Image (spheres, rainbow, N blue to C red):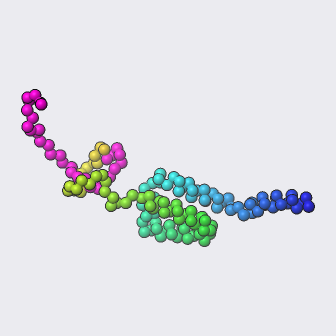
Amino acid sequence: MSTIQQSGGMNYLQTIIVNMDSPYKLLYGFFLIIIIVYSPIISMEYRRFANSILGRVLGIGIIYGIIQTLGWVYGLLTAIAYLILVIGLPTNDTMEGFNGGGSINEKKIIGKRWFVEQVLGEHPKKIETDKVQTSAIEGISSGPMM
C-alpha cells in the first residue's frame, strides 16, 4: 500500500514533465509574448512591410506553418503578434490637429521641415496656412479708460 502512495506523488510530477512542451516551443512562446508586450517599440519599417501585400501573404503563411508544426496555441500567439504589428501602424488618412471648418490647404514641402516638426518627429500632410497676414491695431485712444 505504501508503494502505491509513493508512486502516486511521483506519477503526478511525471505527468507534468511528460506533458510539458519542448524547450524550443517554450522559448518561441516566450519570444512571442515579448513581441506582443513591446510591440510599440518595433520599427515602422517592419510594420509597413507587415502591412504590405507581400507581408500579409508571408504573415498568413507563417501563421499557417506554425499551426501545422507547433500547434494551435502557438499559432494563435503568432496571429496575435502579427495583428498587433499591423493594427498598431498609423494610417495615412488621419488628419492632425483641429479642424475649424476653414479652408485647409496641402502643405508645401519646400526644403527642410519646420523646427517644431523636426523636434517632435511630425510629418503633417495638411496645414491651415503657411503665410501669416498681420495688420496694425486700430481704434485705441490714448485717453483714460472708464
**Which is nearer the eye, 102 or 106?**
102
The residue located at (57%, 66%) in the rendering is 75
Task: Classify the position of the C terminus by image quarter.
Answer: top left
Residue shown at 43%/56% (left/top)? 44
Quarter in which the N terminus is drawn: bottom right
The dominant secondary structure in magenta is loop
- Left or right of residue 127: residue 142: left
* Residue at the extreme front of the image, as rendered: 146
Q: How many marks?
A: 0
Tell me: 13 left or right of 87. Answer: right
**Residue 133, position as x, y percentages in the image:** 15, 45
Residue lying at the far top in this picture: please name it: 144
The answer to whether 36 appears left or right of 27 in the picture is left
Residue at the (61%, 65%) spot, across then down:
73
Q: Is residue 130 magenta?
A: yes
Q: Position of residue 142 (x, y in %)?
A: 8, 29
Image position of 68 (left or right of 50): right
Up the image or down, 90 lies above or below 141; here it is below
Camera-side residue: 121 or 101? 101
Please indicate, yes or no, whether residue 114 appears anywhere in the rendered image: yes
Location of residue 29 (image quadrant): bottom right
Q: Quadrant of residue 3?
A: bottom right
Q: Position of residue 8 (x, y in %)?
A: 83, 60
Give how far across and how far down residue 28 sits, in percent.
61, 59
* Residue at the (53%, 53%) spot, across then down: 37
Please give the range of residues in magenta. 117-146
Residue 107 visible, this orientation? no
